[in-house]
């Protein structure tokens, strides 16, 4: 019988086993580092999105506040213009008061008229004391 030789099983030494374990540990550490890096990138993206949303909200609030302030200023301006128009109309009406004589003043219920009041004139003030139709 011829002796048949079987292929010898590869002999693994302790050094080879340690090298394989170190390589596996390095691979696991690399995968863990990669996962941590991806998690950090995802967190940074989420933080950036949150900051952008906060900035957008602040910008929208500032725009709303500016619009509100403009509306208040416009309302105040319109109110002042209306008040000025009313005062001018009252002044125009007061300046246009004319009485032909003291009978007209008394009939209007305006007697006596003091100097400076609408409708006062020297022709109605006989004694020139500043009080007409006394």
Image (tube, grey):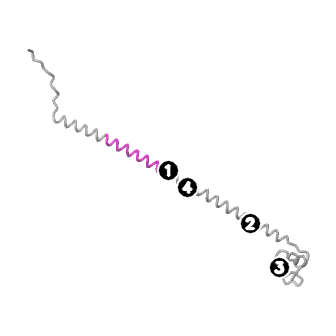
- Residue at coordinates 85% horizontally, 84% vertically from top-left? 129
Q: How far is mark 2 from mark 4, CA to CA? A: 34 Å
Per the rendered image, the range of residues in magenta is 31-53
Q: Position of residue 72 (x, y in %)?
A: 64, 61
Residue at the (21%, 36%) spot, across then down? 19
If the image is split into quadrants, where does the C terminus sit? bottom right
CA neighbours of label 3 inside 10 A, class few (<14), some (14 to 19), many (20+): some
Give left or right: position of 74 versus 45. Answer: right
Answer whether labels 2 and 4 touch (C-beta < 8 Å): no
What's the magenta bit mostly, secondary-structure-wise?
Answer: helix
The residue that label 1 is drawn on is 53
Does the magenta segment cover residue 40?
yes
- Identity of the residue furthest to the top in this view: 1
Q: CA distance from mark 3 to mark 1?
A: 69 Å
Q: Earlier in the sequence, mark 1 or mark 2?
A: 1
The answer to whether 45 appears left or right of 64 in the picture is: left
Tag 1 near tag 2, CB within 8 Å: no
Q: Is residue 44 left or right of residue 91?
A: left
Say which element carries label 1. Answer: helix
Residue 123 is situated, as x and y percent measured from the top left of the image, at 90, 79
Q: Nearer the viewer, mark 3 or mark 1?
A: 1
Residue 61 image offset from top left, x and y in percent: 55, 55
The residue to which callout 4 is attached is: 61
In this rendering, the label closer to the viewer, 4 or 3:
4
Which badge, 3 or 1, comes first in the chain's sequence? 1
Q: Earlier in the sequence, mark 3 or mark 2?
A: 2
Gap in angstroms between the C-alphas marked 1 and 4: 12 Å
Disc 1 packing (10 Å; few <14; some 14–19; many ≥20): few
Q: Which residue is mark 2?
A: 84
C-alpha separation, residue under disc 1 versus residue under disc 2: 46 Å
Q: Position of residue 7 (x, y in %)?
A: 15, 22
């Amino acid at each position: 019988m011829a002796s048949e030789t079987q292929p010898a099983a590869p002999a693994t030494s302790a050094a080879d086993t340690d090298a394989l374990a170190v390589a596996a540990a390095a691979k696991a550490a690399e995968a863990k580092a990669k996962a941590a890096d991806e998690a950090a990138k995802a967190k940074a993206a989420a933080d950036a999105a949150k900051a952008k949303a906060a900035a957008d909200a602040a910008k929208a609030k500032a725009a709303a506040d500016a619009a509100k302030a403009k509306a208040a200023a416009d309302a105040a301006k319109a109110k002042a213009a209306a008040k000025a128009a009313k005062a001018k109309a009252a002044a125009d009406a007061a300046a246009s008061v004319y009485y032909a004589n003291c009978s007209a003043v008394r009939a209007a219920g305006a007697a006596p008229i003091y100097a400076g009041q609408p409708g006062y004139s020297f022709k109605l003030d006989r004694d020139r004391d500043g009080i007409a139709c006394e």
